[in-house]
Amino acid sequence: MKSIKIALLSCLSMLTIACSDDDDNALPLRGERLHSLTAEMKIVRDYVPDNAIIAHRGTSYWAPESTESAYRWARNIGADYLEADLQMTKDGVILVMHDNVMTRTTNIKDIYPNRAKDPTSTFTYEELLKLDAGSWFNKDNPDRARSSFKNQHQYISTLEDLIMYAEGKRLKRNAQGERIWSKNSDGSYNFEYEQDPNDNGNRPGIYVETKEPALNPGIEQALEKELNRLGWNINTQPATETAQFKNGKINVGNTNGKVVLQTFSHESLLILKSIFNGKIPTALLFWKGTGPDDIHNDETSTYIQHINFGLDNLAQFIGPSIAGGTPPDNWPELLNFWQADLIHKSGMKIHPYSFDNKEQMEKYFNNSDGMFTNQSDMTILFYHSKGLRNGGPAYQDAKTVLTTLGY
């Protein structure tokens, strides 16, 4: 009996040493229990294709982010998803806008100097139509500047605009190049669109983020209403197609994976759960910081707690930040090998943000099921180099696509 006990203690000692020698790959032996994705949630997870290319704000590299030029480019270049941050105007229009104030990406200081630092939600959309969301890009990126980003009025996009771009349309403009719109007696807007003459047939989905509910109260409910109105809520209008590619083109926008919801906010995730009941693919985003929903430390138990919160509230994806991006996109590292292993062991899939260079793509490839990318052209070429995405669009030169689209 004594020899058995000695042997057992020896084995345990060796196991402890082995774990301590490779902390990045070690999994917890005790403590917080990792939950698992249910069979029903795996079905929803698999609506989204593997190795998905998620065009972060359309592109923040080649064109003014979140504008018509960025999203038309992302559609034509061959991204699977047009990614967008959602906010809501004072009069209830769902906007595509990352920042809570608009000084970085518009000329608001010139148009509304006394309100320049006011939150986006304090403006009506009619007021925002006066802003130029394109010219700043040329000033910040002279090596990639194009006169058309200034001369062709780039508006702050709406959710409806985003969906229309995904469907192969563009804004309808008058002879002066301004978008055509009207207003109903109830204050709602009618926006006009036309078939994009340079649409190449790709039909991407959309990957949309809701922020803290306090910033835009009711946006989750408004999102459901707008998806219903535009025929993009698979809970009420399920798709019949399943193929990621069709005739060499992106087809995600015609499948049940056409919409992916995402949020950093735990409160927003709870609201999304109550509205969509986990039947639309959903990602919980991870950020390392000091906020109430952030990951506060490097403890395994903390990471598991955040995974479990996503699982328990019907998310099927985790979106962790990754390091190594081009400043200012060099984020805290939240996708070490052991962290990726935990997510995958739970049954969830991983969509890290944001990819700016090939070195990142090589580093995180084996731990990723898709990529938020600022340069979809580079990511397409990378996946092709791995022998993936066969049957999808061929690589295209980013500048040539912009020129073809009239920029």
Image (spheres, grey):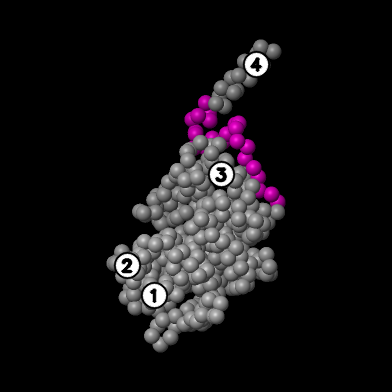
Q: Earlier in the sequence, mark 3 or mark 4?
A: 4
According to the image, label 3 marks what residue? Answer: 306
**Do we see residue 193 in this rendering?**
no
Which label belongs to residue 113?
Answer: 2
Q: Earlier in the sequence, mark 2 or mark 4?
A: 4
> Toward the viewer: 279 or 253?
279
The magenta region covers 17-39
Q: Give the alpha-carbon distance from disc 2 to disc 1, as whole Å.
A: 13 Å
Secondary structure that dominates the magenta span: loop
Q: Which mark's residue is nearer the viewer, 2 or 4?
A: 2
Residue at the spot 64% in from the left edge and 59% down from the top edge: 275
| Residue 133 percent coordinates (x, y) | 38, 70
The correct choice, above or below, for 257 with respect to 187 in the image is above
Q: Is residue 126 left or right of residue 350?
A: left
Q: Is residue 29 magenta?
A: yes
> For the residue marked with disc 2, what is the amino acid?
Pro
Q: Quadrant of residue 64?
A: bottom left
> For the residue marked with disc 1, what is the amino acid?
Lys
Q: Give the alpha-carbon distance from disc 2 to disc 4, as whole Å.
A: 77 Å
Residue at the spot 47% in from the left edge and 45% down from the top edge: 291
Q: Residues within 10 Å of mark 2 (few under 14, many from 20)?
A: few
Q: Are marks 2 and 3 in contact (CB under 8 Å)?
A: no
According to the image, label 1 marks what residue? Answer: 130
| Residue 261 percent coordinates (x, y) | 57, 59
Q: Give the alpha-carbon distance from disc 2 to disc 3, as whole Å.
A: 41 Å
**Mark 4 secondary-structure assignment:** helix
**Mark 1 secondary-structure assignment:** loop
Q: Which mark's residue is nearer the viewer, 1 or 4?
A: 1
**Mark 3 secondary-structure assignment:** helix
